[in-house]
Amino acid sequence: MEDVIINKIAASGIITIDLEEYYPKEEIVSFDLKPFLFMEMILKEKDFRQQLKEVNWEQYRDKYVAVFCSSDAIIPRWAFMLIASYLQPIAKDLIAGSKDELINRLMIKNLETIDFAAFQGKRVVIKGCGNIDISASAYLEITKRLLPYAQSIMYGEPCSTVPVFKKKNM
């Protein structure tokens, strides 16, 4: 009699979601205001406007741009508006914030493309290990969106999971 190896994981009906598949694939760059500041503290309008005219804006073409200031300076709101006037026609999109904030925004945008109704009554594992550092906000978002549909939600790998949620049978 032959021993048949049965893949219990494959037979379990568990669906795995790998958040790395929803990680932005487009190039994401930063635009730091610090080099435009006088003594890394003050934004002088006339100098700032001149410096912006000298920027090679083509380097941002078709890229996602996070506009921020790495100095602890107070930046007037109009400065971000002025930068947007240069970047908007060139960049794919831009935000006022860090690169991580932009990645989170794009991750959530990508997660919004999922038809969560397809997970109705299913057991779902959100893959936990990978090559890309996925933010806590992405895990929170996928869980929030799965909760109305999934029978259960787990974290990890199908062979070793941490239970997160299980619907109560009524």
Image (cartoon, helix red, strand yellow):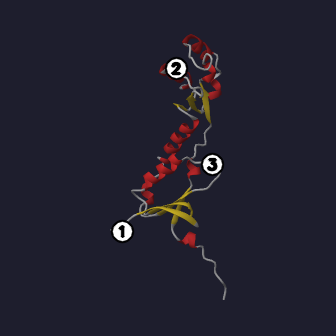
Amino acid marked by disc 3: Ile
**In-image side of 29 versus 108 (left or right):** right
Q: Can you identify the residue that label 3 sits on?
A: 132
**Residue located farthest toward the left when viewing the structure as drawn:** 170
**Whole-percent x, y for residue 22 in the image:** 55, 48
Do the residues bearing badges 2 and 1 touch, measured as CB atoms within 8 Å?
A: no
As drawn, 46 above or below 109 = above
Q: Can you identify the residue that label 2 sits on?
A: 79
Seen at 64% across and 16% down, the residue is 54
User: Dot 2, crowdedness within 10 Å: few (<14), some or many (≥20)?
Assistant: some
**In-image side of 97 versus 29 (left or right):** left
Seen at 49% across and 44% down, the residue is 108
Is residue 23 among what the camera can see? Answer: yes
Mark 3 and mark 1 lie on one chain; the one further toward the N terminus is: 3
Do the residues bearing badges 3 and 2 touch, measured as CB atoms within 8 Å?
A: no
The count of marks equals 3
Q: Quadrant of residue 159?
A: bottom right
Q: Quadrant of the C terminus?
A: bottom left
User: Dot 3, crowdedness within 10 Å: few (<14), some or many (≥20)?
Assistant: few
Mark 3 and mark 2 lie on one chain; the one further toward the N terminus is: 2
Mark-to-mark CA distance, 3 and 2: 33 Å
**Whole-percent x, y for residue 163 in the image:** 49, 63
Amino acid marked by disc 1: Asn
**Whole-percent x, y for residue 51 in the image:** 62, 15
Q: Quadrant of residue 122?
A: bottom left
Q: Quadrant of residue 168?
A: bottom left
